[in-house]
Image: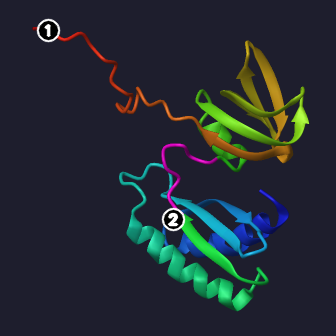
Amino acid sequence: MNAKANEISALLSPTVDALGLVLLGVEYLPSPGGAVLRLYIDLPEGGDRQVGIEDCEAVSREVSAQLDVSDPISGHYTLEVSSPGVDRPLFTPAQFARFAGEEAKVGLKLPQDGRRKLQGRILRVQGDEIVFHLDGAEVVVPLENIDKARLVPDWAALGMAPKKPGKKTS
């Protein structure tokens, strides 16, 4: 997350927590026509349901009022509140650790070993570094160099893999 996203996350996290939800992370995407502020929310671990539209609406109402008062963004912006989805974004070391063993797609701020993008299995977290298994080797990436990271859904495990065309029987 960039500095503005970190600032907004720290500001809004208690409000989201008070609603019984967790603020996973914030994306702040400035642009000349108006910025986009995207909040990703989830239920606390162990919840037996998924984030619904009602949760997103409640968070949107509460944080809109808070943003109007504290005014951390100058100019026009669009607020979006989203569940993490199957390609869950990862923001913190704890989130990477929770999904150790899963495949992640990562965009880097600065090239590392000649790459700006990588896709590999999350092995472990060492302080503020994430260790991935990539091309048969371990690759250590400092969290501060990660621009964006998302889990890669295992469509087969989710029962959503495309069906392979089979032979027709007559």
Q: Is residue 96 left or right of residue 54?
A: right
Could you tell me which residue is drawn at 77 percent across and 15 percent down? 137
Could you tell me which residue is drawn at 83 percent across and 34 percent down? 141
Residue 101, image quadrant: top right
Q: Is residue 70 left or right of residue 58?
A: right
Residue toward you, 60 or 34: 34
What secondary structure characterizes most of the magenta part?
loop
Q: Is residue 61 above or below residue 118?
A: below
Residue 157, image quadrant: top left
| Mark 1 vs mark 2: in front | 1
Q: From this viewpoint, which residue is outermost toward the left? A: 170
Q: Quadrant of the N terminus?
A: bottom right
Q: Secondary structure at mark 1?
A: loop
In the rendered structure, which disc, 1 or 2, sits on the residue that comes first in sequence?
Answer: 2
On residue 169, the disc is: 1
Q: Position of residue 26 (x, y in %)?
A: 68, 62
On residue 130, the disc is: none
Q: Amino acid at mark 2?
A: Leu
Which residues, given as a range, are shown in magenta?
A: 82-89
Q: Is residue 87 magenta?
A: yes
Q: Secondary structure at mark 2?
A: loop
Q: Give the colour scheme of this rendering.
A: rainbow
